Image (cartoon, helix red, strand yellow):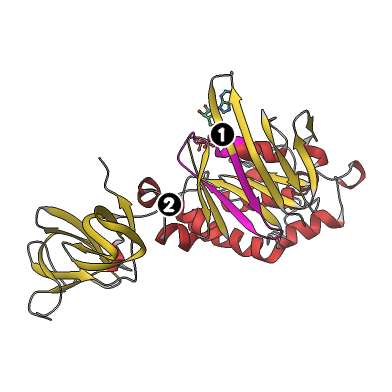
Amino acid sequence: MGDVRVSEVSKTFDGVIAVLDGVSVAVDAGDTLALLGPSGCGKTTLLRVIAGLEVPDAGTVTIAGRTLTSPGRVVPPEKRRIGMVFQDWALFPHLNVGRNVGFGLPRGERKSSPRIDEALELVGLGGLADRMPATLSGGQQQRVALARAIAPRPSVLLLDEPFSNLDASLRAQVRTEIHQLLVELGVTTVFVTHDQDEAFVLGDRVAVLADGRVVQVGEPAEIYQRPATRWLAGFVGDANFIAADAAGDAARTLIGTVPLSSPVGGGSAVEVLVRPEEISIVPVGVDASDGVEAEVELVEFVGHDTTYLVRLDGELLRVRRPSAPVLARGDRARIGFCGDTVTWFPTSP
Ligand code: ATP
């Protein structure tokens, strides 16, 4: 099992645009790091640098204490003890499941080996070694790809958008299966995704990239509750940005006074981040003493919760409660802040 340290990695294609610009991330042994970011931000390139498939212009990659990439020296992928799963899984259609899983093993073990059986057993496909890939479901094929990656007992697992080929109904189920498996295996894992849910569910920590740079690295809850930038606040979930007059560690807003997670120097105009679930909502008359009055413009019920779009002083706010609708479009409601503390950002020009 190895830890992974990427230090100050930069990469330019065609000498023009920096796809990676001084990127540093670290994953402790046995942990899972999600590389999250919008399309084109450099996630796959970073994963390929860790794999040894891409040579950076600058920076180093160290796995389990061995420096595998440094200026002028790149240890090839097959000598890195890494297992990779790509977006399309890349199973060989003409080889049965067992041969697919044995592909990365030493020559004498490729047809049959306890390591093949063990890997298939681990991913819950024991007994399917003789089947052809085309006869398996998408989720099962995905697990074969994972079994192939873990069969050589790598010290690090690299996954590139591992669920992108699955339809929505299967995705959540396979995600949970893989999650359980990664926890059981305890193998150091780095995986790439543009999907916030996926990054938060699977990642012990998440590194958010934008334009080839790391915006923030942290545990999912930290990134959700204390995003480093306004852009990131909106990227990792629904966000209300509310204008506020801040002084010290509190700010006055149109939904009342809110406590700030860090003090503002002097008195100043800022924007505060209020997540939809941090706003309470009740029909007018239920508790007249609490909150300010607003009008419900839209109600969206999705089973486990209800989202209300409410209008207040010309502003539209998103409010989410974990219950069936208690208000309808056009109703008057009272809303108020019910969170802990909020993050603030300087007012955008
Ligand atoms: P996506 O989620 O769309 O796969 P990504 O964040 O993984 O995006 P990368 O695949 O790392 O992004 O690509 C980052 C940028 O580098 C893109 O603009 C891409 O076009 C460019 N790029 C990647 N590989 C090459 C290459 N071999 N030659 C030239 N440009 C490249």
How crowded is the residue under tag 2: few (<14 C-alpha within 10 Å), some, or many (20+)?
some
Which of these two is toward me, 76 or 291? 291
Position of residue 323 measured from the top left corner of the image (x, y, whole percent): 27, 73
Identify the image quadrant of the C terminus.
Answer: top left
Tell me the residue that label 1 is attached to: 21
Q: Which residues are magenta?
A: 23-45
- The amino acid pointed to by label 1 is Asp
Say which residue appears at 52% left-offset and 39% top-offset.
213
- Marks 1 and 2 sit apart, C-alpha to C-alpha, by 18 Å
How far from the left and from the top, in percent, is residue 90?
65, 38
- Secondary structure state at the residue bearing disc 2: loop
Q: Earlier in the sequence, mark 1 or mark 2?
A: 1
Q: Choose between 56 and 341: the one closer to the eye.
A: 341
Q: Residue at image x 75%, y 35%?
A: 70
Is residue 344 highlighted in magenta? no
Q: Amino acid at mark 2?
A: Ala
- 253 or 175, which is in the foreground? 253
- Which label number is shown at residue 228? 2
Lateral position of residue 334 relative to residue 277, left or right: left
Can you tell which mark lies on residue 52? Answer: none
Q: Is residue 151 above or below residue 261?
A: above
- In this figure, what is the number of numbered marks? 2
